[in-house]
Image: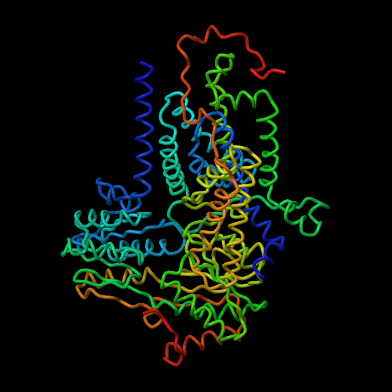
Amino acid sequence: MEVLKIFLTPDFWSSAIRLMTPLMLAALGGIICERAGILNMALEGQILMGAFFAYLGSYLTQNVWLGLVIAMIGSMSLAVIHAFMSINVKVNQVVVALGLNTLAIGITSTIFRFMFGTDSQMANCPGFKAIHIPGLSDIPFIGPVLFGQYPLTYIALLALFGISWFLFHTSRGLELRAAGENPQALDVAGVDVIRIRWLAVLVTGAFCGLAGACLTLNGLNTFYDNISSGRGYIAYAAIVFGKWNPMGTTLATLLFGAGDALQLRMQAMNFNIPYYFYLMMPYLITFLALVFFMGPSKGPAASNVPFVKDKARSSKRRPKQTSGIGGK
Amino acid sequence: MKKKLMALLLAGTMLLGLAACSRNTGGSQGAAGPAQSSAPAASEAPAEKDASDVKIALVCNGAVNDGGWNASAFEGLNRIHDELGVETAYSEKVAIAEVPNVLRTYARQGFNLIFGHGAEFGEPMSTVAPEFPDVQFVAVNANVSGDNLSGTVYKFGELGYFSGMAAAMVSETGKIGIIPPDDAPNNKADMDTFELGAKAVDPDIQVMSAFTGSWDDLPKAKECADSLISQGCDVLLPLGDAYSVGVFQACEEKGIHSEGWVSDQHGLSDTVICSGIQSNPDVYVATAKSFLDGTFTPGVGVYGFENGAQSMSEFYGLNDDQKAQMEAAIQDYLDGKLDIPTLY
């Protein structure tokens, strides 16, 4: 069967990885925030900010790595509002996030129009080049798929292992998870919950900046209004699908990326099927996998619950700072 | 005190969000008035007074800086403003659900001629037009008509045919690809004739297609192109506007050819061997002119090769023999010797 042959081409797998990279970076970042008890539906807006500021930064400085840094700062600026509103002001986190997503479209489109006007020539910025790791990228099949990717893909891989290790093998990671499960207990143990949550939201912003940079700097080198096209929501779904676990979430984004790469290749085969079916496929595959292979998914207990410090505990009576409740 | 400050800040952020929201989806449909809030139109000099009774508005549902479809409408509007001295205003990125209200706002503010740039404006304009009998509504690319409602349509299929011919001449692998956003009737017409034109040159050629499902997802369009290239296509035609850039990028990376659409896109990428041109500005200016001199009659105007609104660009990537062959085919078509199944 011709469709099955698709899976045997390295091109399919490297396309799947290209499609999954932005989702993976955003979802991995989102896990940190979610695990700290802040519901983050604002991934979409932060990706868009990242995409735009990556383009703008790279265009203005003519240096793609500086562009990446500016992208992270850009989406972290949105994260600052998100953190302030949901942690300090304690408003509903879903509402804040949705507001921020709209705000991001407004900010990026407005500055884009302001800087580059309405003329139709899109100025290109410097972009990343695919890195072919010497030796390894010559391996047939695996070489081009795994070792001939853009730098951000390697960063995403490092992030996967880094975040897994941080969350489950360090006491700071334990504190972060406690902030999302039982912040009161963490507070009693003398750890500053507010501070952890703030940091978590900011780190998520930085990761979304990287995800956005994937869209504009990975060979496209230009920006267009709303270029994120809903990828933030898919990244959020991947977090839920992966049960708030970095590895599970990565597999979910891989499933989605592969589904997308598959439908694009199947379209070219001229089967007599309405193309809507193909466009639906990645969602359908993810949905079916969720229904049939995954059990119920339950998030951190304190997600979307603002932390209110008990009045009996003033900040002055804090016990001596230890390395955290999970100390060694 | 602290709580009040928070409340104030909260209100401030929400307002900012709302402002951003209305700026984006409405462009200039706000009650403040299109003329004021659409900055570029407002910053231009006021219209000459001899055409002062006429105000012309344009509504797009994409961005006017997309380098293709919507940009061409904007160019048309600017030419109306510059050449005819008429006051103009525009709203871009108007969501379909918002269109009727944007149209009503313009009509109430005394705009006499309102363009909607796309087939999707036909429906809302048929709803709104009877409410404002003194205003003329023109839906570009829509097959609609009424007492004060007109449509302009291109002969869809002409450009697809000649693009297909050129693609087949250049292709070495015998496989060419087309990347449409959806299968709306106009796209379908060009897709069908693209294949016909290609087969007229090389009966064995294989035509593949991949839909993006989106008008502005550039990374996705690039993946579509990569997918077609990986299946052996070596000439790609994107039937979109903004996302063409993504397709050109993929073609540049893989060193294959592409074709432009709607405007001459050779300037965007060297891979473009030729472009099928729809001259929206000509359609706009012609309509506005006839409106000014009173010869305008509501109805469906068909624009194509015969009245110069559709044409092929220069053939950059073809050799002299091929160029001659293309020009002969176009001449045959104009003389009625070549039949192309067009939509209108």
| Quadrant of residue B206 within the rendered picture | bottom right
- In the image, A300 versus B216, the foreground residue is A300
Residue B114 lies, in percent from the top left, at 26, 62
Query: Residue at the location (67% across, 78% down)?
Result: B172
Q: How is the image coloured?
A: rainbow
Query: Residue at the location (58% across, 63% down)?
Result: A264
Residue A120 lies, in percent from the top left, at 47, 59
User: Vertical placement of A301 versus A327: above or below?
Assistant: below
Horizontal placement of B19 versus B125: left or right? right
Residue A29 lies, in percent from the top left, at 59, 37
- In the image, B39 versus A286, the foreground residue is A286
Does residue B229 appear anywhere in the picture? yes
Does residue A216 appear anywhere in the picture? no
Query: Residue at the location (19% across, 55% down)?
Result: B108
- In the image, B176 versus A258, the foreground residue is A258
User: Farthest residue in the right direction?
Assistant: A135
Quadrant of the image for the N terminus of chain B? top left
Residue B210 lies, in percent from the top left, at 55, 67
